[in-house]
Amino acid sequence: DAKTTQPPSMDCAEGRAANLPCNHSTISGNEYVYWYRQIHSQGPQYIIHGLKNNETNEMASLIITEDRKSSTLILPHATLRDTAVYYCIVRPYSGGGADGLTFGKGTHLIIQP
Amino acid sequence: DAGVTQSPTHLIKTRGQQVTLRCSPKSGHDTVSWYQQALGQGPQFIFQYYEEEERQRGNFPDRFSGHQFPNYSSELNVNALLLGDSALYLCASSSGLADFSYNEQFFGPGTRLTVL
């Protein structure tokens, strides 16, 4: 699996957009980018995933660069409840349902009031 | 609709002992994955069960074993506990028939294991 690099921590003001970067310069053509987050004392929660096109859902937007070597997760209007560790994961799909994921250390996003 | 449940929530064992952790998947899910999360680290994949068979395995020794029952619930067993096995053990469920690109796994709250 391709390695990802994320900043260890970031701050963002409540109500502003939070932009979380992820570098995955060794990504292969068949590897997807997944984002999960883990709020303190809870299990990780799926946010969004993409292959090469930008994606948006009710939680966030995922912007993948044209060369696919990096991506940005955007939380459009951050709230205090968005304070969590955010994990960027790159993984190929091997078929037949969800695969085991290996998480890095992620980015600890702190939303400031 | 119940989500993923795990038991117990906390557990204290001593070195050399054996432990069994339990997980019930989200309703409608048939695949269970187990993860170990050491303090300050991201979760690390242990193994995955589907149709009562171990389908994938991460880089963990044979001391870590598991089982899946016909009702899709699962157990994680760890033998000969070491101090380094102290961690949060997370269970995640998913559907074996998920869309080819879809890797959404639903995680439980975890079991906190402390080895003394």
Image: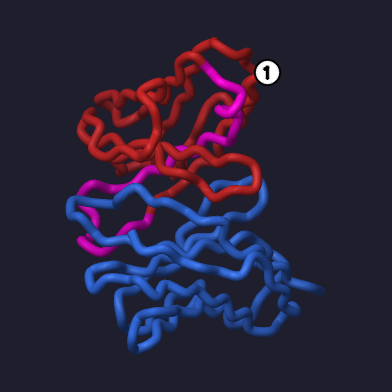
Read off the residue under disc 1: B116
| A21 vs B68: above or below | below
Kind of residue sitting beneath label 1: Leu
For the residue pair B72 and A37, the one nearer the viewer reads as A37
Residue B32 is situated, as x and y percent measured from the top left of the image, at 34, 38
> Is residue A11 one of those drawn in magenta?
no
Residue furthest top in the image: B17
Residue A105 is situated, as x and y percent measured from the top left of the image, at 57, 56
Dot 1 lies on which element? loop
User: Magenta residues, as a range?
Assistant: B81-104
A107 displayed left or right of A51 = right
> Is residue B83 one of those drawn in magenta?
yes
A94 displayed left or right of A22 = left
For the residue pair A87 and A76, the one nearer the viewer reads as A87
Residue B116 is situated, as x and y percent measured from the top left of the image, at 68, 18
Residue A94: name its quadrant. bottom left
Q: Quick one: quadrant of the N terminus of chain A?
A: bottom left
Chain B: drawing colour: red
Residue A99 is situated, as x and y percent measured from the top left of the image, at 30, 50
Q: Residue at x 23, y 74 (%)?
A: A29
Residue furthest front in the image: A26
For the residue pair A77 and B38, the one nearer the viewer reads as B38
Q: Residue at x 41, y 37 (%)?
A: B34
| A80 vs A71: above or below | above
For the residue pair B24 and A21, the one nearer the viewer reads as A21
- The crowd level at tag 1 (other Cα within 10 Å; few <14, some 14-19, many 20+) is some
B11 displayed left or right of B51 = right
Chain A: drawing colour: blue
Residue A66: name its quadrant. bottom left
Q: Chain of mark 1?
A: B
